[in-house]
Image: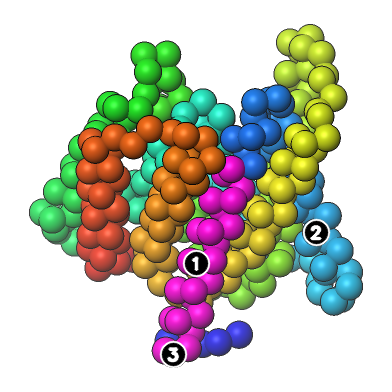
Amino acid sequence: MTPPGTVAGRLSATWLMVLATVLFAGMGVCVKQASSEVTTAEVVFFRGFVGAIMIGALAWHRKLPLRTDVPRQHFWRSVAGVSALSLWFYTIGHLPLATAVTLNYMSSVWMGVFLIALQLWRRWRQVPYRPIHPALMTAVLVGFIGVALVLRPTIQRDQWLAGLVGLVSGGLSAWAYLQVAALGRSGEPEHRVVFYFSAFGTLVGLGLMGAVHLVNEQPWITPTLSTWGWLLGIGVFATLAQLAMTRAYALGQPLAMASLQYLGIVHAFVLGVWLFGEPVHLLAILGTVLIVLAGVVASRLSAGIRD
């Protein structure tokens, strides 16, 4: 593995994250197409199932061990990641692609919120803490102003729930990315991180499918051939993206990598307009720019007060 401190390591991390954003955008297109015919439960299941099969086959072929010494870290990373992913898939199915991606990619802003809350808690408990930089609080405020601008021109009255779900998915994503970085620093290879995440997602997807089709007595509808293709595409794109992203977080600085993820908004915006004919709103573009700027500023300032 390339040492994180070298120029080569930083370049590798940067390009791996760029590749991950492209692959995640492709996954988003597949999710939006599949969601017109299947539920979020099926999407979550097939994303995890295809990923587990791919990584399992790779591990078997290359004789890569799947046994881990940090099962607890994998569990909490999977809880945060699968929860964020499930909420995001729901959002993609109910909102314009660029809007859903923008809400989910507020992870850097949410990291700033978490750190502000941590410092306030330490101050209240009279525990030594580092003062909160005023610019960090400004960045968080600007980020939420950006969200308001993104949502106002694109969300109808019956879509506010999906918008709220998208915001929550962004917060959970921030937690998941911190867990991914911690696993990378503990020496866990990317194939193992992605495998356990995919396996956990498969189990959660099965549970959600059981709740939808058995408890709610909603009949199973066999997907069309094209939808089977979209479901397969979700798993393939997502797994390759996860491998690239996990490697990037292991090589690079976590908050810097989170900032690079904002490229995914650009990809989603172009694909949404091109493939789905989604409208272009000036306020939404302005809001996206504010969120990106807020995320970059929050990433830089948060790095200075992280333990």
Q: Position of residue 273 (x, y in %)?
A: 44, 40
- Specify the principal SS of the magenta part: helix
Q: Earlier in the sequence, mark 1 or mark 2?
A: 1
Give, as a three-letter code, the residue at label 3: Thr
Q: Secondary structure at mark 1?
A: helix
Q: Are marks 1 and 3 in contact (CB under 8 Å)?
A: no
Q: Does the rendering let one see residue 25?
A: yes
Numbered mark located on residue 54 in the image:
2
Task: Please tell me in which quadrant of the rendered image residue 87 appears.
Answer: top right
Crowd band around label 2 with a 10 angstrom C-alpha radius: few (<14), some (14–19), many (20+): some
| Among the 4 quarters of the image, the one containing residue 208 | top right
Q: 260 or 64, which is in the foreground?
A: 260
Under circle 2, the secondary element is: helix
> Is residue 258 shown above or below 209?
below
**Label whose residue precedes the other's in the sequence (1 or 3):** 3
Q: In this picture, is 43 found above or below 130? A: above
Q: CA distance from mark 2 to mark 3?
A: 31 Å
Q: Amino acid at mark 1?
A: Met
Which residue is labeled 1 in the image?
A: 17
Tell me residue 10's x, y (percent).
43, 81
Q: State the mark number for residue 6.
A: 3
Residue lying furthest left: 134
The residue that appears at 85% across and 76% down in the rendered structure is 62
Left or right of 185? Residue 214 is right
- Kind of residue indicated by mark 2: Met
Q: Nearer the viewer, mark 2 or mark 3?
A: 2
Q: Is residue 75 magenta?
A: no
Report, in whole angstroms, how far the alpha carbon at label 1 lies from the one at label 3. 17 Å
**Bounds of the magenta segment:** 6-29
In this view, the residue in front, 180 or 123, is: 180
